[in-house]
Amino acid sequence: MARLRAPGGCPWDREQTYDSIKPYTLEETYEVMDAIDRRDFPGLAEELGDLALQVVFFAQMAAEENRFTISDSLDAINEKLVRRHPHVFADGDAETSSEVLKRWDEIKVEEKKAKGEKPKGILDSVLRAQPALTEAAQISRKAAGAGFDWPALEPVLDKVREELDELADARQRLGPAEIEGELGDLLFTLVNVARFLKVDPEQALRKTNNKFRRRFAHVEARLAGNGKTVQQSNLEEMESLWQEAKGSD
C-alpha cells in the first residue's frame, strides 16, 4: 500500500481519502458476513483479506500524515484486550459471558475517566451510523445493563402482544406517521425478545433473508421448468412450490 500510494504509484490509490474509502470498508464488511452465512470458507479467507486491506489503507494514509502507524493500531488493540480481560490476564473474576460484558463496560468507563473525558450518557456510546436493528440491540443491552429491564421473558412477550394490538388499532384509526411509530415500537420489543433468548436479531434476520431467497429461487426454477414465470402463476401454485422448497431445507 505504501508503494501504491507513493509518487509513481497507482493514480487511483493516490487519490483516495478517508471518506472515499469508507463505503468500501462497509461493503467488504458485509461481504465477510455473507461468506460466513454461506459457510464459504475459501471465500471467507479472500474476503477477510479484502477487509484487512481497508485497515491497511486507512493506516497508511494516517502514517503519511505522521498521525499514527498500523503498529500503533495493533499495539492499542493488544493492550485493550489484556486490560479488558482481567479474568484471563490478571486476578479478575468472571465466570459467565454476561459477567464478562458487564466488566468490559465498567473498564471502558474507567478508561474514559482516566483520559479525563467527561461522563456521557449510557446510550451515547451506541453508534447511530449502523443498521437500525443492530443499534436497537445495543441500546436495549446497554439499558438492561443499567438495570432498566424486564425481570423475565414472559413480560416481554406480553409487551409484544400489546404492541401488536396497538399497531392494529393505529391501522384502523390513525395516520401513516402513527402506524410507523407503532411498528417501530413492535420491532424494538422484538429485539428485546431476541436479547432474552440470546439471539443476535441482525444475524437472525439475515439468515431468514437467505432462507427466503433460497425458497423463492426454488419456486422460480420449478415454474420455469413448466415454462412459466412468477407473474404467470397464481398464489395457490406458488404456495405449493414454496412448501415443497420448505420441505427440502
Image: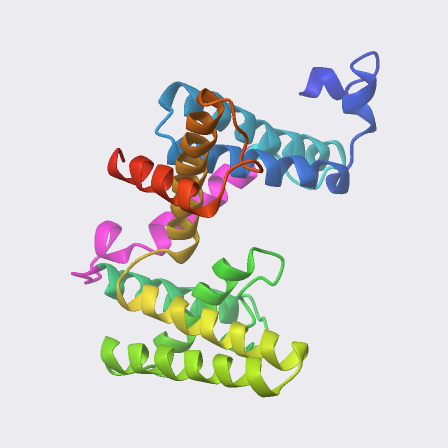
Up/down of 22 relative to 226, above or below: below
Residue 211 sits in which quadrant? top left
Q: Residue 191: name its quadrant.
A: bottom left
The image shows residue 168 at horizontal and vertical percentages of 49, 80
Q: Against 170, is 4 above or below?
A: above
- Residue at the image point whose x is 48% and y is 20% from the top: 46
Question: Does the magenta run of residues contain 80?
Answer: yes
As drawn, is 201 to the left or to the right of 185?
left
Left/right of residue 161 with respect to residue 34 in the rendered view: left
Towards the viewer: 27 or 214: 214
* Quarter of the picture holding the N terminus: top right
Assign the C terminus to one quadrant of the image.
top left
- Display coloring: rainbow
Outermost residue, top side: 8
Return the residue found at the far left.
95
User: Residue 131: where, in percent of width, then height?
Assistant: 56, 56
Magenta stretch: dominant SS? Answer: helix
| Residue drawn where x is 43% and y is 34% of the image | 219
Give the vertical position of 69 relative to 184 (above or below): above
Left or right for 226, reference 102: right
Q: Is residue 248 left or right of residue 134?
A: left
Which stretch is magenta? Answer: 71-96
> In the rendered image, which quarter is residue 159 located in?
bottom left
Residue 138 counted in the magenta span? no
Residue at the spot 38% in from the left edge and 24% down from the top edge: 40
Name the spot of residue 106 as percent of width and height, x first.
Answer: 38, 69
Residue 48 visible in the snapshot: yes
